[in-house]
Amino acid sequence: MNDTDTFPWWRKDASIVAALVAMAAISFVVTLIFTRSYQRREQALAERWFQRGEAHLTQGRPREAIIDLRTAMLYEPDGPQFRLRLAQALAANNDTPQAIAYFQNLWEGQPGKGLYNLELARLYARSGDARKATQFYNSAIYGAWDENPAEQRRRARLEYITFLLANNSRTQAQAEAITLAAAVPPTDVQARFLAADILMKTGEYERAAEGYTSLLRNDPIRASTGAAEAAFQLGRFRSALNYLQQALSKGPSSSLQAQLEQSKLVLAMDPVQHRLTAAERARRVIEAYNTAGKRLQQCAAIKNEPLMATPPTTDMQRLYDEWATLGPEPNAKRLAADPEDRDQVMNLTGRIEEATSRQCGTPAGADWALLMLSRFGEGVER
């Protein structure tokens, strides 16, 4: 009798099962080793193609980067960084519709992510969709950022302001610039200069002037240059002159020197400047009268319009009739004694300069100075 015949049946089955389990385990381990090896190889290939794409994108070669990144995604299709860089490569290559589609897909997964909103804002701005660009710019400004959120939001707002100015939305740009300036910490000097620059760019000259003057101790040259420009735009030529002299004390600048000369000219022609003698006021009024009369005649000649007409029918003819009634030249003694007569002549010269600037363009020299005196009045002495 064979010894194996004495083993119970279940002992035989258990041996078979154990053998099968061992074989299965070995197969599983082998499969796992091969699978992981294959995955590592795919990851390595994906990373290699991704690095190629990064290099091409950095070199300004987005078309090659797109090919590289799409190849990388064949090996790792769900990599969010791969999809992000591919979307950015498409945007850099001006493939706007495809880039929007990729970023829209990323945005749907994380609608509050600042970067995705900013990229979409840029793409919609490029495609001319101002409504959607505005929507995504605002979402970027108030969105979530992984690093330096305050700085990233400030940059997004700066970009939005540039977009608004490009689309002739100056009022909204000014509101955004004011908001940006209000959020800057007092200790961040560079950010305060940037805010003042943006206020200046949007035409918020009053606030820009305040911003620059508050920084005079931090960087006198940069601050005085900005304050001078703001004062110049506000027609405060006395302040502009002082700040320009400060700015030029550290070195020459042709643009600043030109503004300095213009500021001096306005002040030199101003008959209401403080501490002038009556005779000097009268002299300046007569000079303004003669200057404006010549400008009126020159502009009429350019427009081929006769000035002497009975009755006068055009603006320039009426102004010439009024001007001629005072002349050939107002009486110096009368002007020295009577402020009302001086005001009458200066009012006329201002109206002449405004009318001729509309007809013949912005003047230069003394005519420009008279135009500034007309527009800003006593403010030029601030």
Image: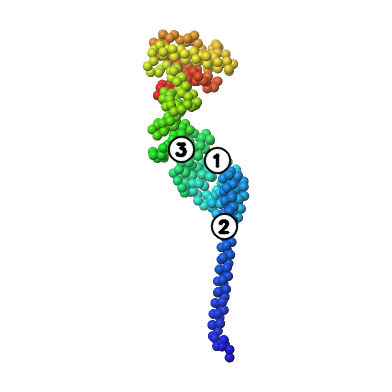
**Viewer-side label of 1, 2:** 2
Residue shown at 59% from the left, 52% from the top: 49
In primary-sequence order, the first of circles 1 and 3 is 1
Q: Picture coordinates of residue 139 (x, y %)?
A: 48, 45
Residue at disc 2, secondary structure: helix
Residue shown at 58% from the left, 67% from the top: 31
Examine the rendering and report whether any part of residue 230 can be seen: no
Q: Which residue in the protein does label 1 denote? A: 125
Examine the rendering and report whether any part of residue 271 can be seen: yes
Image quarter in which the N terminus is found = bottom right
Q: Which residue in the protein does label 2 denote? A: 43
For disc 1, the neighbor class at 10 Å (few under 14, some 14 to 19, many from 20) is many
The amino acid type found where label 1 is placed reads Ala
Quarter of the image holding residue 188? top left
Contact flag, marks 1 and 2 (Cβ < 8 Å): no
Q: Which residue in the protein does label 3 denote? A: 176
For disc 3, the neighbor class at 10 Å (few under 14, some 14 to 19, many from 20) is many
In primary-sequence order, the first of circles 3 and 2 is 2
Residue at disc 3, secondary structure: helix
